[in-house]
């Protein structure tokens, strides 16, 4: 009997300790009471509460003191015409990359406007990503499903986002075609559903490939089955996007009304004749303050084809990146650019400035993280790719603002562009691609070093959309 009483008492003591441990750190009625006492409903807070009852926070926080502080004029600007529209898709990286090349064609051939077919390159981007995924599954076929790499592959089976190196992989292998040769479709402009269905099929394929390994099938047999699976993906893409041309006949009218001779091209010959740049001459520069500068990095598996280039970049301070960007613009060379576009964006006016919104005054709190801290806590990362087209230099040759050609249509922002202050560039720019001709020898030597290999799940390197 005494033993039973002892065990009951011990159990009550243990339960009491457990409940106390659960209570420690919880919001108790006493803590909540202190919150209520500390919160004083001042006239300012009452006004903010009433306003937010029916109004969007961004509308209320918009800093009207910023209105009219900037103009749309730039001391140096790359010559181009027209604005593209990615519609409801994550293909900003592809549009931004194509728009780096577009001014060259417009200028060389004296065109009023010209667009490449993003749909053409997107088709092969998706097909190659499907193959990359299945090769990754084959490579990891002996690992458990909960292995981190296998899990990452399954979570990221396919997507419509990407970066510059993916553009290079596609152009070098498949070339380019004009927009009129392979126009957009509803699925190419609204990619979510077809991407979801392809991802579903790929995950099903992944399980089948792994089962073949478990059943003792050899690698040639597994790859033969993979090819049959890829045939299904090709069919899904062809139905939704159209089948890409292998040859086409095309001609153009220039700004003076002259019509060229009709000529037959392959996508590769078209690229060679109308663009003809060596894409290996372009280098991705990045500003990531969480890692050492003046060093070369590579992201494992961050590519869109099995044999293609991984994402590789030189990490540099903003000041150096700006120097190279300015030289590029002065030489009429547009640049691939990616950033955290949603931060402090006045979308209506197309204005990016660190002082656009005053959330602190509206909500009565301070937001004090710097760029490094925002990256480390997942608060900030690159979310959108655009084309850097202009810079405004003051009398001391220091940049005050920059111009980005966007791919959200002509009605978006300032005539299809975003105007970015230099301070915003420092805080939210992440990647710029620069031709080697505008980079100093010291920086180029970094390319000769062995890159630090980073894992594909690093939060800094999610593909932009």
Image: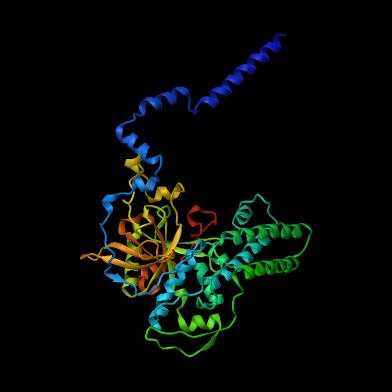
In the displayed orientation, state which residue is furthest to the top.
1
Please give the count of numbered marks on the rendered protein.
0
The answer to whether residue 9 is above or below residue 465 is above
The answer to whether residue 369 is above or below residue 18 is below
In the displayed orientation, state which residue is furthest to the front.
54
Of residue 48 and residue 354, the one placed in the foreground of this image is: 48
Of residue 66 and residue 98, the one placed in the foreground of this image is: 66
Please provide percent x and percent y for residue 108: 39, 83
Q: What quarter of the picture does the N terminus occupy?
A: top right
- Which quadrant of the view contains residue 308? bottom right
In the displayed orientation, state which residue is furthest to the right.
215
* Picture residue at 66% right of the left edge, 14% below the top: 8
302 on left or right of 365: right
Q: Is residue 450 visible?
A: no
In the displayed orientation, state which residue is furthest to the left.
395
Q: Is residue 238 visible?
A: yes
Please provide percent x and percent y for residue 425: 35, 58
- Which quadrant of the view contains residue 36? top left
Please provide percent x and percent y for residue 150: 64, 54
- Which quadrant of the view contains residue 437? bottom left
* Picture residue at 68% right of the left edge, 11% below the top: 5
Q: What's the coloring here?
A: rainbow
Please provide percent x and percent y for residue 188: 55, 66
* Picture residue at 52% right of the left edge, 25% below the top: 23
Of residue 273 and residue 300, the one placed in the foreground of this image is: 273
The answer to whether residue 37 is above or below residue 464 is above
């Amino acid at each position: 009997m005494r033993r039973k009483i002892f065990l009951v008492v011990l159990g009550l003591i243990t339960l009491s300790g457990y409940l106390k441990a659960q209570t420690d750190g919880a919001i108790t009625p006493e803590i909540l009471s202190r919150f209520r006492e500390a919160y004083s409903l001042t006239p300012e807070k009452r006004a903010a509460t009433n306003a937010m009852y029916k109004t969007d926070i961004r509308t209320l926080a918009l800093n009207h003191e910023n209105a009219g502080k900037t103009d749309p004029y730039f001391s140096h600007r790359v010559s181009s015409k027209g604005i593209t529209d990615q519609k409801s898709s994550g293909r900003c990286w592809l549009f931004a990359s194509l728009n780096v090349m577009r001014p060259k064609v417009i200028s060389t051939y004296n065109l009023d406007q010209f667009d490449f077919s993003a749909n053409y390159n997107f088709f092969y981007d998706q097909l190659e990503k499907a193959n990359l995924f299945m090769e990754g599954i084959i490579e990891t076929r002996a690992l458990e499903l909960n292995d981190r790499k296998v899990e990452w592959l399954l979570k990221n089976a396919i997507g419509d986002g990407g970066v510059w190196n993916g553009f290079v992989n596609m152009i070098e292998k498949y070339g380019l075609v004009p927009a009129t040769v392979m126009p957009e479709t509803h699925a190419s402009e609204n990619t979510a559903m077809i991407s979801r269905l392809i991802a579903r099929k790929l995950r099903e394929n992944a399980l089948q490939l792994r089962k073949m390994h478990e059943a003792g099938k050899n690698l040639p047999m597994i790859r033969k089955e993979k090819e049959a699976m890829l045939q299904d993906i090709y069919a899904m893409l062809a139905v939704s996007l159209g089948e890409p041309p292998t040859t086409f006949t095309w001609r153009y009218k220039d700004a003076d009304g002259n019509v060229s001779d009709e000529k037959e091209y392959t996508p590769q010959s078209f690229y060679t004749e109308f663009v003809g740049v060596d894409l290996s001459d372009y280098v991705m520069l990045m500003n990531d303050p969480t890692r050492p500068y003046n060093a070369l990095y590579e992201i494992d598996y961050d590519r869109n084809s099995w044999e293609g280039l991984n994402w590789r970049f030189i990490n540099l301070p903003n000041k150096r990146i700006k120097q190279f960007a300015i030289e590029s613009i002065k030489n009429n060379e547009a640049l691939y650019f990616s950033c955290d576009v949603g931060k402090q964006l006045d979308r209506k006016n197309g204005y990016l400035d660190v002082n656009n919104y005053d959330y602190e005054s509206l909500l009565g709190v301070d937001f004090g993280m710097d760029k490094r801290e925002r990256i480390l806590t997942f608060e900030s990362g690159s979310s959108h790719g655009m084309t850097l087209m202009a810079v405004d230099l003051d009398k001391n040759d220091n940049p005050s603002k920059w111009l980005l050609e966007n791919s959200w249509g002509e009605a978006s922002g300032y005539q299809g562009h975003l105007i970015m202050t230099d301070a915003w560039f420092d805080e939210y720019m992440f990647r710029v691609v620069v031709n080697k001709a505008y980079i100093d020898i010291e920086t180029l030597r970094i390319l000769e070093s062995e890159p630090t290999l980073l894992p594909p799940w690093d939060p800094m390197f999610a593909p932009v959309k």
